[in-house]
């Protein structure tokens, strides 16, 4: 069983913000797979999907970003999901808007959602798909920037990144994550 987690913040005021790109990718997967996120448990909203490659859970933690581990750890324990079967999708300030970077491990890099996951999982070694949102313009606070919406000019770039993320997740269901990294990081 695989667990695909998209990080974000619950609530209308956070919808379609830079920090919620993980939620948007999970919603795109749920829509493509016709799997509504209608199960509420583990401090999250999730869907169980039966794919030809096996069972997949799609999860949006509803704990707020900084406490994401409080949702991910219990669902992994309950379903006995191995750490190598986890993929976390989240925003990254250090990547150009729309650029993807897949990794198998690493530090939190200042991302509070990843800090929470590392704390609750007890390891930095889990698969990630980072979606670039770029750095804020000079003079703008990072917190204000990540909670802002994408511009009209950025929308097509972000939509393309979401589609590529969906492709990467689907590819990861039948290939080793290292092979998926090599394929998608080269794009």
Image: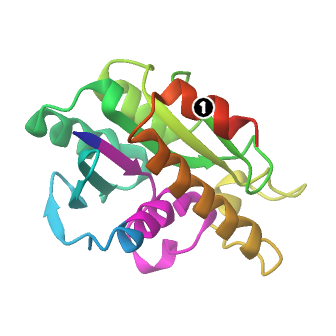
Left or right: 10, with 35 as reference point = right
Would you say residue 161 sits in the magenta stretch? no
Above or below 94: residue 123: above
The span shown in magenta is 3-29
Q: Where is mark 1, residue-wise?
A: 181
| Quarter assignment of residue 44 | bottom left
Give how far across and how far down residue 23 sits, in percent.
45, 62
Q: In this view of the protein, which residue sits in the foreground, 7 or 180?
A: 180
Please identify the residue farthest to the left as the structure is shown.
78
Residue occupying image coordinates x 52% and y 21%: 105
Q: In this view of the protein, which residue sits in the foreground, 163 or 66?
A: 163
Q: Quadrant of the N terminus?
A: top left
Residue occupying image coordinates x 55% and y 22%: 107
Q: In this view of the protein, which residue sits in the foreground, 67 or 122?
A: 122
Residue occupying image coordinates x 23% and y 58%: 49
Give how far across and how far down residue 8 sits, in percent.
45, 58
Give how far across and how far down residue 9 sits, in percent.
43, 62
Crowd band around label 1 with a 10 angstrom C-alpha radius: few (<14), some (14–19), many (20+): many
| Quarter assignment of residue 3 | top left
Give how far across and how far down residue 41 sits, in percent.
13, 57
Q: Quadrant of the C terminus?
A: top right
């Amino acid at each position: 069983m695989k667990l695909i987690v998209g990080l974000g913040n619950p609530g209308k005021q956070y919808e379609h913000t830079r920090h919620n790109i993980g939620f948007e990718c999970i919603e795109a997967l749920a829509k493509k797979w016709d799997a509504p996120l209608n199960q509420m448990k583990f401090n999250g909203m999730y869907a169980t999907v039966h794919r030809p490659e096996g069972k997949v859970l799609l999860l949006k933690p509803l704990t707020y970003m900084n406490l994401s581990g409080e949702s991910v750890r219990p669902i992994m324990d309950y379903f006995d999901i191995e750490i190598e079967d986890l993929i976390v999708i989240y925003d990254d300030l250090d990547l150009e808007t729309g650029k993807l970077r897949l990794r198998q491990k690493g530090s939190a890099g200042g991302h509070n959602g990843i800090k929470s996951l590392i704390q609750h999982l007890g390891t930095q070694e889990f698969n990630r798909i980072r979606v670039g949102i770029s750095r804020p313009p000079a003079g703008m606070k990072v917190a204000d920037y990540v909670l802002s919406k994408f511009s009209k000019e950025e929308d097509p770039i972000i939509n393309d990144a979401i589609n590529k993320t969906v492709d990467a997740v689907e590819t990861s269901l039948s290939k080793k994550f290292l092979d998926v990294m090599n394929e998608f990081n080269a794009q």
